[in-house]
Image: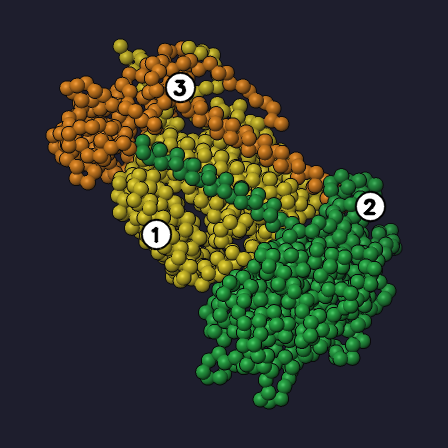
């Protein structure tokens, strides 16, 4: 046999894959070093200089250090780190305070990710947890209805002791766990019921964008688990029906659709945001206006909803495509993690995380380029917002947990193979 | 920095950023593909990965590899597809629980007996147990190290320690190239199935892994 | 698990397809609408444009400099510049709506809308590098417009000298080349002096407002061009003869009578035209006939015809930001439909759109995109862009219809009984249509005239609007004659 071929272990993405990690890592580190240095040259703000050093270092530690201490998937970590750092960069460019705040959020996100990774990797009995999560989720979702404050037409924020957060972002995580578990035990009716209740609560809060995402992910998960074409068809019809219903019932849905079809008709009023976003993207052209040269502050909600337009504005549409491809690579990795798992629960969990990131990205970028009406969801990892970033990192944490479990299963199979050979 | 100089520099840097971005994306996809190929190779090398044993028919000796979690039935989507008397399209699901055994759950009341008693969650099959689905009799064989129950039979979720105890903690990944012969696949092939495991594509022995691993130190 | 894995793979393909859709749509949108989006943005960017670029010059089609920059060095040795207008006040007033003033009171003037050329945004990277290395302050591109400033100045004088019009008359004049789409004049009245220090914001006549491209008005009888096109397309109606009794009674109550009252008549008197065919009805601008015909034609057909001419469309022209024209919405009563046929009841269009409609009739049914930019040159003299004409849409394809409409419009100006006789010009085939739109709250009607010279040697079309003065044939047509006379004189 091929003795002496080094760096090949059964650990699929452990210490061995340095040959692929290193060049990617170095490219990414160089990117951020140069970008922050450029921003420093613009205004000689020491914070930029500090970030020029800190961000590449954190990326390095993240991709090389974390896997040594915790079960982790290097590829996933690299992609996530790049996207989060890009978020910090663009937000810093918009407003240094927000950039630094995002960096802090990123730190919290990484911690949350590690917790989620360990949880998914080692917990074997999920039934009890799910039983607790169902009432907790419904309660959390009901919270804004009772104590919430209205932001941009949707009542989905809650402030507790000075901390503002969106319960729907947290419930996103628990719903995934609940759904995956129920479906793995073939309790389809129950899963539809729980999803329905959550959706209903979200509609009451008028958080239609998040409801749309929940629905999409739940539909995909239910179909994947049951393989029932009937349920899929019903789900699609239901989506269409709900869309029409939402259009009739909610005035602001009507406005969003009208302004999506023709934002130019109300250039200064309700179409302003879309028009400014499109203008900014076109102004950037293929290569962008150049970092620090554009005028991104003109776009409303440039920090969260329209962050993609800001990226296309300053870095160019080609770079925007590169960012989309990064997301695609992330999704592909998530899919392969889901497929490699041997447990239905973990497989569904990974699938839901991947589908959620994918759908969310599609919805928000689609809104930015006027492919679909704008909804109030954020771009994962890049948009400003603590809750959004932390919940996205938790999704990655779940994925890492499943990946780590896959690796462990493979290691066990190795052990067994050797044991079988050594038996007489 | 004077505005004009910054303008020129930034205009130049955007091409640099784009190139770095493209290089990063290409490498990411290459890595992705590499992971996929490595995993496939590992599966070929470890034919039992993801499987906990086999299901046999005592009279005819037919076997099927038993995955850790899966479905049994006559329909196309089942992991163990058997056309037998009384077997529904989706007859039952089974799930290996570490330290307990194979838990078999009938789907929508399909007649399933485990060791001649009704199969339900909470009852586990071990090596040598029989499963009667419809009118078909199967025997369960679990791999070594998987058939002994570690605890007294109790609902797995009652014991909270179970939630966290996992045997894989502390295991070292082994180097399969430590000079040992590669184990042959010892389970008969599945019926024609587009999603069949690659190791069962008719090869009798997986080829040796001879692709050297490059140490890519350059990145641009 | 097997089916689960298969489904997961299918979901992967779905997500990939979604992302490819994003990328494809993004690329498509950018190429189709990109330049348009950028032009609109020029306003925002102008405010933050660096002061270290000297704007390029703006000239008219004959080379007359309309805008230039005076470059000076201030006490710190820094280069500063100031915008210089022509010395002649009348000239300034005539072109200010096209050029835009320095405070951006006029929306979408050339100075703002084409700032990408004037302020050097179109400079390539080597050019920027070159100017950076040489240390000289950059200059933006110079623009040559299709505008004929002498014509504009003359129009201002004619209107000022016309005693029939009040001093502060409100209106708009658009002159175009119907063959290429080049705009020779785009004027709005009252105008203002861009160099004056006072603010015109509170003036009653709204001088900053560019009526030619932003003002939306009821077209009145000029819309009969479109109605006639609709009638000619309908086999039943095209050869029908109409009876005009002076009053068209739309319903029993008598509250919705349509009369032919082009000029104020004494109480109880109505103008009755008797039996007429479509050609005659067009020539004398018979309300009865057209109202009846529109009602027979139906709202659907009339709307379709109007939309073929550009109503309800989102004008996305490269050089001009033209307000959309509107055809009124659905569920209308018979009376409203009939009134639409004669150009009232909810119809709205801009003077420039009317000029486009006339141009389409002149140009064999093909409506060309209105263009302002003749050429853009870099500071070094190299050409960055030159004029290209483009077809906007083709409202008419049937040669019979086109021929008929052209001859109807010829009749209006040249045959006895035509309402536009005042626009006729010896030796040239002038075609046109008058309009007198009734406006609620206005004592007099709005005077409209639109027309063209049916000759390839002088392919010009006009649209004239004069608010609150009276009949189109009396007030607007004479101005059209003067404009055509001026333009044809230059041909010989």
Which residue is found at the position 36% from the left and 45% from the top? A218
In front here: B121 or C284? C284
Residue B206 visible to an observer of this rendering: yes
Q: Which residue is mark 3?
A: B174
Residue drawn where x is 42% and y is 36% of the image: C12
Chain A drawing hue: yellow
Chain in green (letter): C
Secondary structure at badge 2 equals loop
Residue at 58% x, 66% y is C228
Relative vertical location of residue B70 with respect to residue A132 in this rendering, above or below: above
Q: Residue furthest left?
A: B116
For the residue carrying disc 2, how many other residues have a C-alpha within 10 Å: few (<14), some (14-19), or many (20+)?
few
- Residue carrying label 1: A238
The answer to whether one can see residue A88 in this image is no
Q: Which residue is mark 2?
A: C381
In what quadrant of the picture does the N terminus of chain A appear? Answer: top left
């Amino acid at each position: 046999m091929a003795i002496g071929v080094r760096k090949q272990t059964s650990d699929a993405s452990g210490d061995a894959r340095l040959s692929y990690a290193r060049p990617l890592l170095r490219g990414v580190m160089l990117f951020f070093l140069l970008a922050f240095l450029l921003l420093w040259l613009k205004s000689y703000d020491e914070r930029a200089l500090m970030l020029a050093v800190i961000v590449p270092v954190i990326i390095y530690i993240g991709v090389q250090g974390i896997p040594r201490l915790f079960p982790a998937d290097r590829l996933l970590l690299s992609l996530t780190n790049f996207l989060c750092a890009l978020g910090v960069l663009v937000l810093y460019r918009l407003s240094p305070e927000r950039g630094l705040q995002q960096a802090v959020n990123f730190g919290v996100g990484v911690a949350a990710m590690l917790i989620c990774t360990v949880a998914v990797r080692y917990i074997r009995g999920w039934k009890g947890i799910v039983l607790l999560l169902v009432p907790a989720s419904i309660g959390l979702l009901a919270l804004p209805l009772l104590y919430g404050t209205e932001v941009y037409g949707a009542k989905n924020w809650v402030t507790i002791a000075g901390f503002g957060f969106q319960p729907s972002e947290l419930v996103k995580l628990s719903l995934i766990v609940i759904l995956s578990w129920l479906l793995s035990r073939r309790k389809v009716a129950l899963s539809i019921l729980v999803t329905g209740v959550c959706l209903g609560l979200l509609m009451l809060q008028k958080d239609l964008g998040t409801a749309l995402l929940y629905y999409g992910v739940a539909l995909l998960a239910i179909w994947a688990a049951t393989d029932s074409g009937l349920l899929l068809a019903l789900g699609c019809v239901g989506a269409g029906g709900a869309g029409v219903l939402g259009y009739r019932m909610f005035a602001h849905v009507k406005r969003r659709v009208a302004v999506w079809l023709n934002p130019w008709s109300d250039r200064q009023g309700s179409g302003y945001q879309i028009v400014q976003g499109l203008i900014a993207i076109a102004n950037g052209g293929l290569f962008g206006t150049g970092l620090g040269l554009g005028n991104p502050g003109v776009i409303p909600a440039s920090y969260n909803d329209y962050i993609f337009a800001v990226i296309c504005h300053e870095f160019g549409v080609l770079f925007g495509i590169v960012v989309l491809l990064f997301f695609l690579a992330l999704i592909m990795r998530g899919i392969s993690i889901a497929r490699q798992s041997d447990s239905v629960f973990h497989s569904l969990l990974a699938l839901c995380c991947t589908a959620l990131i994918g759908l969310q990205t599609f919805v928000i970028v689609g809104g930015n380029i006027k492919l679909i009406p704008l909804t109030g969801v954020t771009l994962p990892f890049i948009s400003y917002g603590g809750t959004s970033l932390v919940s996205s990192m938790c999704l990655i944490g779940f994925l890492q947990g499943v990946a780590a479990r896959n690796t462990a299963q493979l290691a066990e199979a190795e052990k067994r193979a050797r044991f079988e050979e050594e038996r007489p | 920095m004077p505005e004009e100089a910054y303008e020129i520099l930034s205009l130049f840097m955007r091409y640099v950023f784009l190139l770095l971005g493209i290089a990063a994306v290409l490498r990411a996809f290459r890595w992705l593909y590499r992971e996929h190929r490595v995993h496939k190779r590992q599966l070929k090398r470890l034919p039992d990965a993801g499987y906990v044993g086999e299901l046999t028919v005592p009279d005819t000796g037919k076997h099927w590899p038993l995955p850790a979690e899966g479905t049994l039935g006559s329909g196309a989507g089942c992991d163990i597809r058997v056309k037998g008397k009384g077997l529904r399209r989706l007859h039952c699901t089974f799930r290996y629980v570490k330290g307990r055994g194979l838990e078999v759950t009938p789907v929508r009341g399909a007649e399933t007996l485990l060791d001649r008693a009704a199969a339900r969650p909470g009852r586990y099959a071990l090596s040598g147990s029989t499963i009667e689905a419809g009118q078909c009799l199967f025997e369960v064989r679990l791999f070594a190290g998987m058939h002994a129950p570690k605890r007294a039979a109790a609902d797995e979720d009652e014991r909270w320690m179970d939630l966290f105890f996992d045997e894989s903690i502390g295991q070292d990944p082994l180097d399969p190239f430590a000079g040992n012969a590669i184990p042959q696949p010892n389970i008969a092939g599945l019926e024609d199935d587009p999603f069949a495991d690659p190791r069962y594509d008719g090869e009798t022995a997986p080829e040796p892994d001879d692709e050297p691993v490059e140490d890519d130190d350059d990145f641009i | 698990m097997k089916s689960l894995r298969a489904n997961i793979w299918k979901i992967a393909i779905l997500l990939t397809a979604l992302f490819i859709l994003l990328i494809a749509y993004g690329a498509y949108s950018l190429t189709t609408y990109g330049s348009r989006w950028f032009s609109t943005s020029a306003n925002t960017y102008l405010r933050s444009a660096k002061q270290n670029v000297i704007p390029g010059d703006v000239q008219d089609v004959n080379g007359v400099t309309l805008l230039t920059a005076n470059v000076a060095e201030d006490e710190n040795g820094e280069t500063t510049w100031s915008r210089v207008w022509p010395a002649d006040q009348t000239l300034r007033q005539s072109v200010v709506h096209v050029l835009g003033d320095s405070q951006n009171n006029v929306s979408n003037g050339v100075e703002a809308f084409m700032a990408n050329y004037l302020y050097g945004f179109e400079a390539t990277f080597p050019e920027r590098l070159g100017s950076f290395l040489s240390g000289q302050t950059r200059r933006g591109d110079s623009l040559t417009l299709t505008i004929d400033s002498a014509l504009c100045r003359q129009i201002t004088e004619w209107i000022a000298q016309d005693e029939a019009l009040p001093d502060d008359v409100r209106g708009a004049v658009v002159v175009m080349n119907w063959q290429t789409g080049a705009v020779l004049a785009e004027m709005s009245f009252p105008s203002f002096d861009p160099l004056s220090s006072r603010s015109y914001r509170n003036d009653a006549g709204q001088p900053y407002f560019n009526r030619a491209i932003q003002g939306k008005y009821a077209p009145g009888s000029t819309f009969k061009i479109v109605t006639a096109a609709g009638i000619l397309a309908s086999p039943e109606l095209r050869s029908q003869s109409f009876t005009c009794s002076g009053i068209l009674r739309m319903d029993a109550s008598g509250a919705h009578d349509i009369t032919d009252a082009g000029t104020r008549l004494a109480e109880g008197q109505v103008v009755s035209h008797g039996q007429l065919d479509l050609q005659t009805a067009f020539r004398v601008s018979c309300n009865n006939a057209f109202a009846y015909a529109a009602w027979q034609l139906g709202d659907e057909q009339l709307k379709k015809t109007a939309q073929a001419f550009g109503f309800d469309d989102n004008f996305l022209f490269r050089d001009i930001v033209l307000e959309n024209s509107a055809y009124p919405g659905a569920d209308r009563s018979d009376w409203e439909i009939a009134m639409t046929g004669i150009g009232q009841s909810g119809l709205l269009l801009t003077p420039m759109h009317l000029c486009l409609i006339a141009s389409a009739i002149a140009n064999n049914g093909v409506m060309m995109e209105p263009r302002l930019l003749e050429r853009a040159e870099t500071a070094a003299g190299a050409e960055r862009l030159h004029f290209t004409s483009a077809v906007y849409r083709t409202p008419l394809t049937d040669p019979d219809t086109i021929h008929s409409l052209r001859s109807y419009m010829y009749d209006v100006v040249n045959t006895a009984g035509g309402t536009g006789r005042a626009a006729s010009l010896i030796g040239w085939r002038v075609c046109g249509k008058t309009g007198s739109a009734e406006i609620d709250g206005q004592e007099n009607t709005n005077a409209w005239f639109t027309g063209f010279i049916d000759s390839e040697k002088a392919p010009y079309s006009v649209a004239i609007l004069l608010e609150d003065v009276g009949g189109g044939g009396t007030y607007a047509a004479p101005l059209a004659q003067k404009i055509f006379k001026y333009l044809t004189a230059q041909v010989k």
